[in-house]
Amino acid sequence: MKISTFSICLSVLLCTCIFQVKAQQYVSPTKPVELGRAPKMKVKLLSTNGQAKTYMVIFSKGDEVVSGLTEFAQKYNVKSAHYTAIGDAISAKAGWYDYKRKEFKIIPIDTAEITSFIGDIAIFNGKPVAHTHFSAATSDGIVHGGHLLELIIGPTMELVITTEPTALYKKLDPEFGAAFINPDQEK
């Protein structure tokens, strides 16, 4: 049986298209967070300076960080905060914002070292919301990153968070379909 060059090219093109369709998943920037996915998370108060407090939050193997940060913010009644962290991940999902779709393109990341992790917490629709950007290096040394959608911890992640007494509120921006901090907003 003779296979033509056209048939081979068509097969390769079809396989490439199928792979790209599967790889391009999207999620809303205002998707609610699933709670209860960080059961081993531990918290320790490090210091108090007036009404500002600094905590160490430790995540353990299998904990999901977005869920844990949200639970922390709810339990400790956080109105505004900022944080940084180090650690590693069994898996992660970064988001790249697609302006045309008004959604995050999901970028899956395999086992990786967290090379940067920074974010803040503000109130949206009456609840605290964590907004994190991160980067993670995979075994080949390539760094991937973006908006944090999901992060499943390997052995540990150590997060230092400072809560502030002044509340910050987010407002939905219809142009982008995302909520942004509005420093002028009061409740």
Image: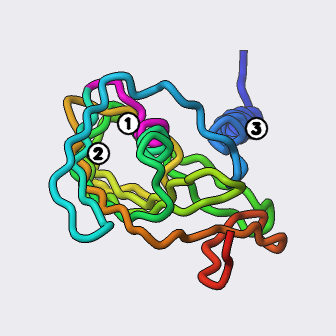
Q: CA distance from mark 2 to mark 1?
A: 7 Å
Residue 100, horizontal then vertical, whole percent? 80, 67
Nearer the observer, 59 or 12: 59
Mark 1 element type:
loop
Residue appearing at x 47%, y 64% in the figure: 80
Q: Which residues are magenta?
A: 61-68
Give the residue at mark 3: 10
Residue 132, horizontal then vertical, whole percent? 45, 58
Q: Disc number at residue 138?
A: 2
Q: Disc number at residue 110?
A: 1
The disc, 3 or 1, on the residue closer to the chain's N-terminal end is 3
Q: Is residue 168 above or below residue 135?
A: below
Q: How many marks?
A: 3
Pair 3/2: label in front: 2
The disc, 2 or 1, on the residue closer to the chain's N-terminal end is 1
Residue appearing at x 40%, y 39% in the figure: 65
Residue appearing at x 25%, y 39% in the figure: 43
Pair 3/1: label in front: 1
Q: Answer with left or right where residue 90 lies relative to residue 147.
A: left
Q: Answer with left or right where residue 142 lies relative to residue 170.
A: left
Marks 2,1: beta carbons within 8 A: yes
Nearer the observer, 22 or 97: 97
The amino acid type, in three-letter code, at marker 3 is: Leu
The disc, 3 or 2, on the residue closer to the chain's N-terminal end is 3
**Badge 2 density bin: few <14, some 14–19, many ≥20, Cα 10 Å:** some
Q: Disc number at residue 5?
A: none
